[in-house]
Amino acid sequence: MTPADSSARMRALCARAPVIPVLVIEDAGLARPLAEALVAGGLPVLEVTLRTPIALEAIRAMAEVPGAEVGAGTVLTAGDLAAARQTGAGFAVSPGATPALLDAAEAEGLPLLPGAATASEAMALLARGHDVAKFFPAAAMGGAAALAALGGPLPQVAWCPTGGISPATAPDFLALPNVLCVGGSWVAPRAMLEARDWAGIEERARAAAAL
Ligand SMILES: O=C(O)C(=O)C[C@H](O)[C@H](O)COP(=O)(O)O
């Protein structure tokens, strides 16, 4: 898959809803009802971080939920990317980007949302043909003001900021012309997951979808 096709796919996914929930799942049994709650609440695009031992199992279960578009997050290596694709992930998200990871995404044919946090990193992605990137860690790197400033010289880069974003700050990002959607873990926090509070998570998803 070419970088241009990858970017186009990520643009389409970000157009589905204003928020991509970032999910840390410790128990594979929670994956399916969690995906059902998020989709029911209006958030169909889901990022499952590869930070737990059962993350790939969770992706497999969630990908079967009608309407869900499930991707793998915390993709750091070519091996992570290959495992994500083989498991049925529809896209991958990385906190940064290396040439090896970008090569792997092209070779595997898996759309990748690569991370960048500076003008030089965004320029490196542009030089490879990627014009959609994850701004990470968004709040710590200067928040919406930083992205607005990057949009001056680099208006051709469209962003999905993630990291430290809340329902209170998400609108500041979403109001920017160079922001497609935002990512965040607040929609499905650990305590609600452990409590299997599917109604509560669906309600949070509904609120996020309305941002
Ligand atoms: O693991 C990854 O690759 C990530 O995507 C890191 C996430 O951006 C943050 O975990 C978002 O979490 P919050 O800041 O709690 O919303």
Image (tube, helix red, strand yellow):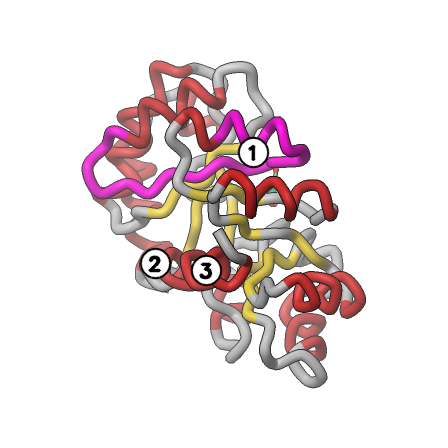
Q: What amino acid is found at the position of numbered circle 2 in the picture?
A: Ala
Crowding around mark 1 (Cα neighbors within 10 Å: few <14, some 14 to 19, many 20+) is many
- Residue corresponding to mark 1: 81
In the image, residue 68 lies in the stretch drawn in magenta: yes
**Where does residue 198 sit, x and y in percent of width and height?**
28, 30
**For the C terminus, which image quadrant?**
bottom left
Among the two numbered marks 1 and 3 on one chain, the one whose residue lies closer to the N terminus: 3
- The secondary structure type at the circle numbered 2 is loop
Question: In the image, is residue 72 above or below residue 158?
Answer: above
Q: Dividing the picture into quarters, in which one does residue 165 lie?
A: bottom right
The image's mark for residue 72 is none
Which of 176 and 187 lies nearest the eye of the viewer? 176
> Mark 1 against mark 3, which lies toward the viewer?
3
Among the two numbered marks 2 and 3 on one chain, the one whose residue lies closer to the N terminus: 3
- Residue corresponding to mark 2: 17
CA gap between label 1 and label 2 equals 24 Å
- The secondary structure type at the circle numbered 3 is helix
Residues at badges 1 and 2 in contact (C-beta under 8 Å)? no
CA gap between label 2 and label 3 equals 20 Å
Give the residues in magenta: 64-84
- Residue corresponding to mark 3: 5
